Amino acid sequence: MSYKYKSIELSKISVIGAGQIGPDIALHFAKSLYKYDIKISVLDVSSLAIEKAKEKIFKKINKGTESGVFKIDQAERIKSSIIFTTDYKEVVGSGLVVEAATEDEGIKDKIFKQVEALTDTCCIYLSNSSHMQPEVIFKNITDKSRCLVAHYFFPAEINPAIEIVPGRDTNLDITKLILGFYESIGKVPVKVKSSYGYAVDPVFEGICQTAILCLESGMGNEKEIDKAAVKALGLGVGPFTALNLTGGNPITAHGLDELGRLIIPWFKTPETLKRKVAEKANWEVAQRGENIELTKYREEKLVNEFLGAYFALSSYILDLEIINISDFNMICEISLVIKAPFELMNSIGIEKASHLVKEFCVKHKNFPFPKTLEQANKAGGWQLKDIVSEKIDQVATITIRRPKVLNALNLSVLMQIQEALEEFKQDASIEACVITGFGTKAFVSGADINMLAALKNPQEGYQNSQTFQSILNYIENYSKPIVCAMNGFAFGGGNELAMACTTRICKKGLPVLVCQPEVNLGFIPGAGGTQRLPRIIGVEAAAEILRTGKSISAEEAYQLGLVYKLTEGDLLEEAVDVAKKIAAKSIDIKIMPREPITNNGNPKQIDLGHLSKKIDEILTKAIYEGSRLSLKEGLELESRMFGECLKTEDMKIGLENFKLNGPKQKAVFKHK
């Protein structure tokens, strides 16, 4: 067997380097691709390194089995898919080679010379460098068009972020293929132009440098500085702890001086870091459960220093024009487990953020105030997007990209979609549109729960529903056909968005495609779900789905008529094809009726289990009375009924339970 992604067909992948990160890269490939019987070779010239890599990988797999992440047979298949070797001949037959060796130009050059002699011209070469430009790494490769950097982040088998860095000779189509390939196996890739350190590492290493400078200037000890950094930036762990966990002292020490030479002279390896490297020593950090106390004055000084550094570093990377702001905002948050920089600046106020950066730049004379931050200050904030738009033939595509929350909808996302559609409307060359989601797991996981939890009274609930409905009505009545490409499950508002489109297609074989889970949280759909679903699949079938919160598979959705087509091929390509055919009127699409449904029957008695009887009463009224009205009138009724939910105790109970315990624990409703 093999794994196919567009023109890439892989039966074997080689990972060269069995040190710190290579085994984790191999494990991610094995976890993602074992079902396709792909062989993953882990290669190193050191037999001891290979033994340690095998031990490390198998330990992680066994831990996954114990925790229930893997079934026993899955774990065995993952293990058996990995080959551990010191023999370079194992590279033969690889369609993809990922080098993860020491950050040394000579070593990387030697590796790829050997690889080039053993692989064919279709093999793609990736280097997991954290700093070096592809032009340097691949300078002696004959065909540089298939060479890129793929910068993984710790721990590589879990952290989804990855920077894809093409060189000046890299084929654009291959770059696009690699971006799509990594998305297809669960990563969140972003494209970064060739620059030393790329986009993220200068920020991480700059934060580490800031922490060490704070230590050297007596602003606190390692433990105190770590705590202040976590508080200021929302880090998962402080910078000193991160350096210990990743073994990052040597590479950071080297990287800082090179960043100072190639990017901005502010970067410079502190003397304390040089000593740590020479002594092969770790930083003194807090142990699990240890409580670190800081005086208010010290904490405030450290927090402001870290915020100033973070905002200055992030803005300066934008000055380099190597990555767009939305990609950078997203990848920082995911890769470093940190508050998204530009979103954070907007939230605290762009004037305050600018003031913190000015204070930082005054203190650090060789750090110039970033030009992009000047522009953002004048504009009143950073302009960020959660959607990605492009044009394929005569079809405009919109991808909702919020991977951290599985593409959950909020009003901002919907407004961005509407704004994009407004632009497309003016473009005569665009005949149709496609809306899809990022990744392979979720089209849209639902509406933003924090937004719903913030609603205080029936009027606010009614207004929230009306606002969402107005945008979905705009999509439904758009002047050009819109196809929804459901790349994964569509829950709640995701399915409501899909139903507003002209038609829907999805991947064949999805065990869960659609669910309206609102009743589990103590409220009803408010963006058209109670009105469009009955008109598309019939009142009784819709009522069962809406009242029980049960999910349906792709095949069930197709049989019910909710989706037009199931596809085994490339979903986006299929959606574009369907959109073009609808625009050309070469296929007939069933249009959802807008008029009242006369044969809608009466609500059936169903076993509600733990669900709220009070919410079911409101929901059945919306479904059955709404179906007897025109769609416009029914949507108005739904908004009023959604507002009614805010009068109940059960909506408060449901939302609070979800926020505290997640979706798996059932809420204890009071039915009032």
Image (cartoon, rainbow, N blue to C red):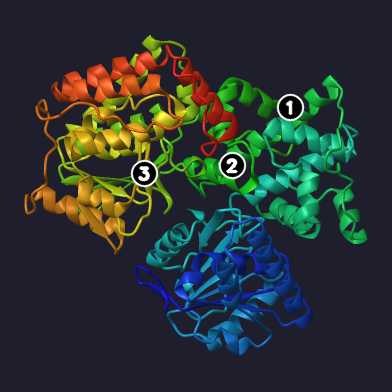
Classify 212 as above or below 68.
Answer: above
Residue 208 x %, y %: 76, 45
Residue 551 — which label?
3
Q: What kind of residue is marked 1?
A: Asn
Residue 601 x %, y %: 16, 28
Mark whose residue sits in front, 2 or 3: 3
Q: What kind of residue is marked 2?
A: Glu
Q: Secondary structure at mark 3?
A: strand
On the image, which quarter does residue 410 sit in?
Answer: top left
Q: Which residue is mark 1?
A: 304
On the image, which quarter does residue 635 sit in?
Answer: top left
Question: Gap in Å between the C-alphas at discs 2 and 3?
Answer: 31 Å
Q: Secondary structure at mark 1?
A: helix
Residue 495 x %, y %: 32, 39
Nearer to me, 66 or 608:
608
Residue for point 8% across, 53% down: 587
Nearer to me, 625 or 471:
625
Question: Gap in Å between the C-alphas at discs 1 and 3?
Answer: 47 Å
Which image quarter is the C terminus in?
Answer: top left
Q: What kind of residue is marked 3?
A: Ser
